Amino acid sequence: MIMALKMLTATSCFVKAMLRPSTLCHSWEILFGRETSLRSFSFKHGIPPSAKYGGRHTVTMIPGDGIGPELMLHVKTVFRHACVPVDFEEVIVNSTSGEEDVHNAIMAVRRNCVALKGNIETDHNLPPSHKSRNNMFRTTLDLYANVIHFKSLPGVETRHKDVDILVVRENTEGEYSNLEHESVKGVIESLKIITKAKSLRIAEYAFQLAQEMGRKRVTVVHKANIMKLGDGLFLQCCREVASCYPQLTFEGMIVDNTTMQLVSRPQQFDVMVMPNLYGNIVNNICTGLVGGAGPVPGANYGHTYAVFETASRQSGKNLANKNMANPTAMLLASCILLDYLKLHSYATSIRNAVLASMENKDVHTPDIGGQGTTSDIIQNITNHISTVN
Amino acid sequence: MAALSGVRWLTRALVAAPNSGTWRNLCTSAVAHAASRSQAEDMRVEGAFPVTMLPGDGVGPELMHAVKEVFKAASVPVEFQEHHLSEVQNMASEEKLEQVLSSMKENKVAIIGKIHTPMEYKGELASYDMRLRRKLDLFANVVHVKSLPGYKTRHNNLDLVIIREQTEGEYSSLEHESARGVIECLKIVTRTKSQRIAKFAFDYATKKGRGKVTAVHKANIMKLGDGLFLQCCEEVAELYPKIKFETMIIDNCCMQLVQNPYQFDVLVMPNLYGNIIDNLAAGLVGGAGVVPGESYSAEYAVFETGARHPFAQAVGRNIANPTAMLLSASNMLRHLNLEYHSNMIADAVKKVIKVGKVRTRDMGGYSTTTDFIKSVIGHLHPHGG
């Protein structure tokens, strides 16, 4: 009897897994037909062909504000030294750009399917009709998963050692839905949207990723004791998906407890999945744990597009043009980009060079406790690439 | 001066160096004099890029000889791996084709002459040329038609780019005799390939900063075939709001090209129209001897002349114009990131043409190919000091 039940659940899981599209296929487009067709303009017949000609890829580059432009310049220098077959199409969008510029930039990412992005500052003194540019990118391109791998870097002094957490954050709904209104004078209603479809999607992505990377445990971060329906739905979706991955341990943890555990014993976490705002907070905590905004790269994935950026989306306004910013995050993000484009050899060589220069305490930038400048560290990295065997 | 001596030292050092593993990429841009290593690729000569060379038929071998001479004089770190594939000279077979293909797949860059396709039907509808292109999936053929300064033609200061879909269309090699005396010849137009070439054209225009793309078609007659091509171009055009998209029927396009070619910027079109317009445009700026061309697939790049003619009448007479092949070789060097050498050779060729003293017969002069090559070599070094 129990065997029969187990087999039933197993087969239903199997059937569900067969019918449920894998992270990379397009049949979700059919499910969200109307929603995505509004966004995908007239490329109804799937993704545009890739921008790879004669062995060279074209990648959109959006420098953004603050330290963005100088970091992008450094990425280009390093790529040139390593002879990477990638050309960048630069699109300028800053905090002062109009809607049209942003749409041009989004179009550019659609064309090339891959982008490297700096942070575009959102001035919160402007009226609410001025939407966050970064958010526009994420929602229009449907980059639903924000994936950041937090790993203690050798050579960077931190209070916690051996941190190795993979955080998957839902990137398009939740508290960032931009739905707020003043129902009665002096009373603001701010809507947090949780949908079953998107929750299932992100949970599926997280479990699939955990399985691919050989991880053991997935922790869902939520506040379902208070937001019983909202986060309750998210938790339920994760539980549903977890039942199809019996080899992975599933646990739920409330966000307040999570943050406390993260700062006392971060080694207990393996893979974490969560809705948008908690993700923002947890990401930044973890960034702080492994050494700050300087060394950590991040990636945003959708079904068709991928945008790579730094983990903590800070524009670093006060560090701009002072030659003090840490280029590691952007360089490691570009390595993840190269891995995505399947240029693994180039990715490894640049990554090794970056990690090697991280070990060299003389060239550490001020944010990780050194006295070096950005150009010193870039010089170190390029020398390393040139001289490696 | 310093740059040239730096490069020479570098190449000499590399060639003389003991077997230090695998070296492939040599970035000799003026800013980055850093040699970086290859990513797991075997090389026969230290420090040189391997490039497949297919001399082809007609004057192909002479033109390739010109390229080799100029490269030697400019100390270009490129090593040619020659293969001879020719239908008319009975040097074609399946295994030869396989050899050539594996060489090209390894090197990823090739320079080829025209492999002539005989007129007679010997049982095989697809020529070796076509099969090579299909196997490597070289779907885009780019011919940059640019007036050479100093050489006056009926149209001066022309600068247009012709992008031609190279793997389907009328060249699908699908023909049969359905009833006696009735031949059906199939022109294949597919959505994926049309989208691909349209995207290539717009990406090319974006990269080179061009403002307009014109799709050339005959959709009023071939409503479904060219209609699909046009529809795909329109779909792709929506992703590029900054680039103007126009369409033009092939007959009107040909007339406009000979009356007022300045109105065109980038042209994209299916296979046969591309063949015709390539040659037409080449004629506008000076003929088959002066226009370089290249073919791209996602992985490979092949460099050749723009208008592909074997020019069999000129074999052995030393009168062929090597300009097209030299300019194409210079483009190849740019593709290999050897900017310095690329500019050196291109400038030398352009200077020789501008000065006008040494010109081959097709450009109105009396010089031979060897004279031209000597003149180009002469102009190489004073540039670098």
Image (tube, coloured by chain):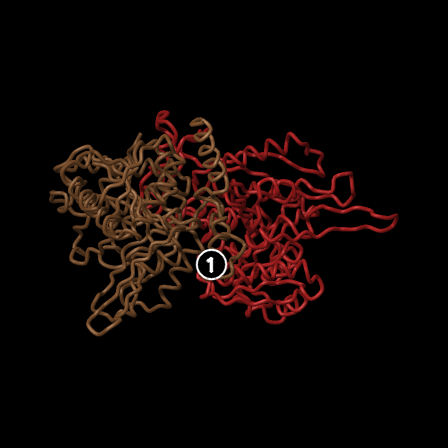
Chain colours: A brown, B red
CA neighbours of label 1 inside 10 A, class few (<14), some (14 to 19), many (20+): some
The extreme bottom residue here reads: A185
Quadrant of the drawing holding the C terminus of chain A: top left
- Residue B90 is left or right of residue B246, and the answer is right
Residue B335 lies, in percent from the top left, at 45, 46
Q: Chain of mark 1?
A: A
Question: Please, what secondary structure does the residue beneath circle 1 have?
Answer: loop
Residue A155 lies, in percent from the top left, at 17, 35
Instruction: Name the amino acid type tagged 1.
Output: Ser
Q: Nearer the viewer, residue B321 or A357?
A: A357
Residue A239 lies, in percent from the top left, at 35, 41
- Residue B338 is left or right of residue B298, and the answer is left
**Is A369 above or below relative to A71?**
above
Q: Is residue B385 visible?
A: no
**Is A32 above or below relative to B82?**
below
**Is B315 above or below relative to A117?**
above
The picture quadrant where one finds residue A383 is: top left
The extreme front residue here reads: A1
Q: Nearer the viewer, residue A55 or A186?
A: A186
Q: Which residue is mark 1?
A: A40
Q: Nearer the viewer, residue A96 or B362?
A: A96
- Residue A178 is left or right of residue B97, and the answer is left
Residue A124 lies, in percent from the top left, at 21, 65
Q: Nearer the viewer, residue B320 or A4?
A: A4
